[in-house]
Amino acid sequence: MKNYNTKATQELTEHFFRNEYGKIVSVVTRYVGTDHVQTAEDIVQETLLKAVDHWQQNGIPENPRAWLYITAKNHTLNILKRKKHLLQYQTHHKYNVLQDQREDFHISEDVINDEQLKMMFVCCHPTISENSQITLILKILCGFSISEIANAFFTTRETINKRLVRGRKQLRDAKISFEIPQNSGESIDIILKTIYLLFNEGYSPSRQNKIVRYDLCLEAIRLTEILYTNQNILNKSNIASLLALMYLNVARFEARSTSDNLIEMHKQDRTLWNKKLINRGIYYLNETTKDNATSTYQILATISAQHCIASSFENTNWIEILALYDSLLRLQDTPVVRLNRSIPLAKVKGNKAAIKTLIQLKQDSDIESHYLFHATIAEFYIQENDIDNAVISLKQARILCSNPRDIKLIEKKLKNIVPI
């Protein structure tokens, strides 16, 4: 038998694992119940393993996506037939495959979106701790590996495994209805926080030497649009704010990197910025003004919009951006926000004012444990021609940095100010 173990086959199976994993888990969970999410995940894992084997041996089918769903459906029905004890809990759920095995998997984008939305709320049920909620969504809905989730949380694989075990147990014990809850506000906040983590993992990958992971950013946008377009969710200002933020950021992707280098904003070719995506982001930002609420995502999106509409980096409205960061501090006074605020502060009040602020921040927090602190203050030292302090800060940034992509950028700056 001919073996189709090609790079193209491998890349396609990896693509489907990333893009279809959460969708199939959500559809299968409709049938097996929320207290058996682990079973749904096992079914999907086996389906994807079968795909790898079958596609390598027989070639990629004409409709790979349909092949996956049909295989998952057949495996689900076989599991349910074998586990007769499931009859005892199926009576507590809306769907009962064992009573009507003729019921098919009705696969369409609307069905998939509906099931994924329900799964978002299942993972964010109030009985589940916040850390476990986010971990469950990243694992179940987004197909993150344990390592990727650990990187997103800046923690260990062991910690993430414990959260998953705890979260799955809480799902089993709670027997959560597979539906959109009546009062969904608190759960939506957790869902948005998780989706933003997903987007950031694509925008600035923490794993491997990757510049960007465009697929993760598009998946984050897709999940958020499922929330936004659902008629049962009424208060959508915060959802629109996150959509605006993501669209405005993703619009700059083409100019933000080459195949192996990250390009800082002041060096980007703005003609490469996607005007269609910028307009989409501004559309959603305008939607947030329909009520008087102010949110973190709305402020961040407005900051991003200021960058997108500026003719150049130097002509950016830095006074307005500094004022926006001051507003953000009233909602979210964190070391990271203060670190980011130092950039418009330097543009408005000078590099020395920014350096002074960061030195104070170093004394008041543990921000110096993050390489971005040292990389940022080094930039101000460079602009002030304080080469000695710039070199010290860049070397410390290189020590603390773990991503080869960012280390490369730091070493390039070091070489530029201290030529070999």
Image (cartoon, rainbow, N blue to C red):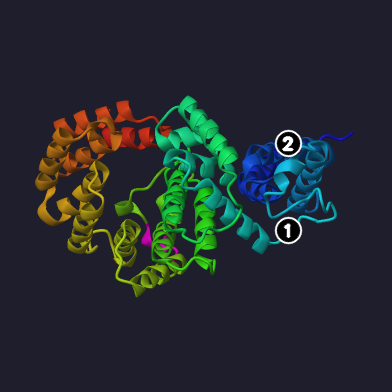
Question: From which residue to which does the magenta span run?
Answer: 269-274
Q: Is residue 275 above or below residue 100?
A: below
Which residue is under mark 2? 46
Please give left or right for residue 336 compared with residue 281 in the image.
left
Residue 270 is covered by the magenta coloring: yes
Location of the C terminus (image quadrant): top left
Identify the mark at residue 99; answer none if there is no mark. none
Residue placed most toward the observer, 205 or 326: 326
**Residue with the mark numbered 1:** 107
Disc 2: CA contacts within 10 A as few (<14), some (14-19) or many (>=20)? some
Pinpoint residue 117: horizontal percent, then vertical percent: 57, 56
The amino acid at mark 2 is Glu
Residue at 65% x, 48% y is 20
x and y percent of residue 321 in the render? 22, 60
* Three-letter residue code for mark 1: Ile
Q: Is residue 226 visible?
A: yes
Residue at the location (57% across, 36% down)? 168
Residue drawn at x 44%, y 27% as measured from the top left? 156
